[in-house]
Image (spheres, rainbow, N blue to C red):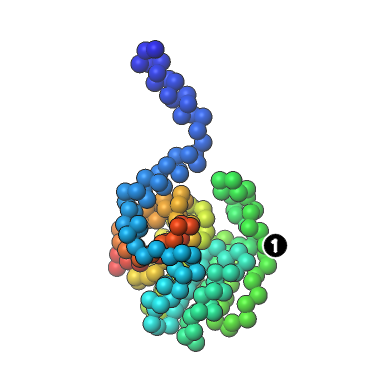
Amino acid sequence: MGIVNMRSLIKYFLSLLNASFYEKGLALYLLRTKFKEIRGTTKHLKREDLWLDTIQKCNNKVLFLEFGVWEGYSINFFIQNIKHKDSLFFGFDSFEGLPEDWYTNPKGTFNVKGKIPEISDQRVSFIKGWFNQSLPKFIDDNLSKAHDFKLIVHYDADLYSSTLFCLSQIDRLKIKYLAIFDEFTRDETRALYNYIQSHGATVKFLGHTDNHQVLCEIQPII
C-alpha cells in the first residue's frame, strides 16, 4: 500500500470518530501534562470530605456561588456546614436541565421542571435562568461587595461552554478564590485550561477525589 493510500485510509478512519473522542483525548492530555500536579495533592475518599476541607480553609464569612444546582444537595451541604451568620449563598441554574446535548445526556437532562430547592436558610438565594443572562448582572452588582468575603465557587455546570463562561465572569471580581470542580474530566478540564490561557490566571491545586472532583485556588490577574 502506497503512502498516499495509507494517509487516505487514516483520514477515513479518523473521520468516523466523533468530536467527543477528541475532547476526551485532549482532557486526558491536559490532566497528564498541564495539570499533573493534581496527583500530588491531598486525596479525599469522597467529595463531601473535599468539601469539608474547602470549608476548613475559610476563617471569615463566605460568599458561596454554585453553577449547576439541580436538586440542591451540594449547596445545602455547604449551608449546613458554614456557620458564619453573615455568609451568603447563591445558586445559579435554569432548573430546566441541560441547554444542549452533553455526550450521552440529551438536552433537558437534569430538568426539575423549574422547581427551586426548598431550603429555609435565609442566607441562600437562587438565581433562576441561563448563566449568560443572569451572571453578568450579578457580577456587576457585586464587584466591590465580594472583596469582603472569602469566595468559594462550585463549578458543576457540566458543559464546556457554560464552565468557561462562568470562569470568565468570576475573573471580573479580581480576587483570589477557592474553586471546586465537580467533574474535572473532559469539559471542565478543557474549560479551566482555556480560561488560564486566555486570562492569564494562575491555579494552585489543593485536593482531589477518585471521582474527578478537584479543589484549587485561582488567582486572576489584578
In the image, is 114 to the left or to the right of 196?
right
Image coords of residue 174 (percent x, y)? 35, 69
Work out whether residue 196 can be spotted.
no
| Secondary structure under the numbered disc 1 in the rendered image | loop
Q: Quadrant of residue 214?
A: bottom left
With 107 as the anchor, is 191 left or right in this view? Answer: left
Q: Amino acid at mark 1?
A: Lys
Q: Residue furthest bottom?
A: 85
Q: Nearer the viewer, residue 47 or 146?
A: 47
Q: Quadrant of residue 217?
A: bottom left
Residue in view at x 49 percent, y 87 percent: 85
Q: Position of residue 170 (x, y in %)?
A: 42, 66
x 54%, y 69%: residue: 74
Q: Position of residue 171 (x, y in %)?
A: 38, 64
In the displayed orientation, state which residue is furthest to the right. 113
Q: Quadrant of residue 71?
A: bottom right
Image-based side of 68 in relation to 51, left or right: right
- Residue farthest to the front, as pictured: 45
Establish if 102 lies above or below 138: above
Look at mark 1 in the image and give the residue it sits on.
113
User: Residue 53: percent from the left, percent from the top?
Assistant: 42, 72
Looking at the figure, which quarter contains the N terminus?
top left
Q: Residue at x 63, y 58 (%)?
A: 110
Label 1, residues with CA under 10 Å away: few <14, some 14-19, many ≥20? few
Report the number of discs. Answer: 1
Residue 67 visible here: yes
Q: Residue at x 32, y 63 (%)?
A: 204
**Vertical relation: 51 (above or below) 159:** below
